[in-house]
Image (cartoon, helix red, strand yellow):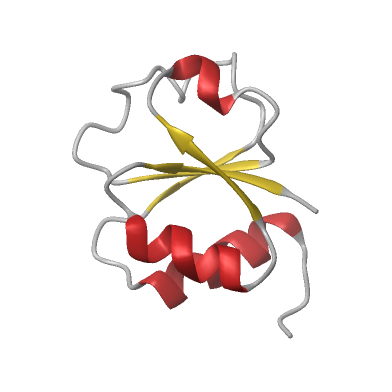
Amino acid sequence: MPKIGVEQSLTDVQQELQSKGYEIVQLRNEQDSQGCDCCVITGQDQNVMGMQNAAFEGSVINADGMTAQDVCQQVEAKLGRQQQ
């Protein structure tokens, strides 16, 4: 199952992704993103954890202005996963 890193403040997104079977990692610092297939950030400071540099090879989704369902759709699209 894909591992998704989600910023701590996005609890609704964490819950929605968990309900779809994703493994969730709370992002507190740059090291937390290691091993994640995709990361979801709030967009308040897009590079606060340095995740937009070459060290993170997965997709980064900016959740600013999106619902938890919108974010899940973006994650599924980025990972090429069919909606259930």
Residues 13 and 48: in front is: 13
Residue at the spot 40% in from the left edge and 17% down from the top edge: 50
Q: Quadrant of the N terminus?
A: bottom right
Q: Quadrant of the C terminus?
A: bottom right
Residue at the spot 24% in from the left edge and 65% down from the top edge: 65
User: x and y percent of residue 54 in the render?
Assistant: 58, 15
Occupied quadrant, residue 64: bottom left
Residues 61 and 31: in front is: 31
Would you say 4 lies left or right of 41 here? right
Q: Give the number of marks.
A: 0
Considering every residue shown, the one lying at the far left of the view is: 44
Q: Looking at the image, is 71 positioned above or below residue 48?
A: below
User: x and y percent of residue 17 in the render?
Assistant: 55, 64
Q: Looking at the image, is 5 positioned above or below residue 28?
A: below
Q: Looking at the image, is 78 positioned above or below residue 58?
A: below
User: x and y percent of residue 74 in the render?
Assistant: 54, 64
Residue at the spot 46% in from the left edge and 58% down from the top edge: 14
User: x and y percent of residue 38 in the render?
Assistant: 61, 43
Occupied quadrant, residue 46: top left
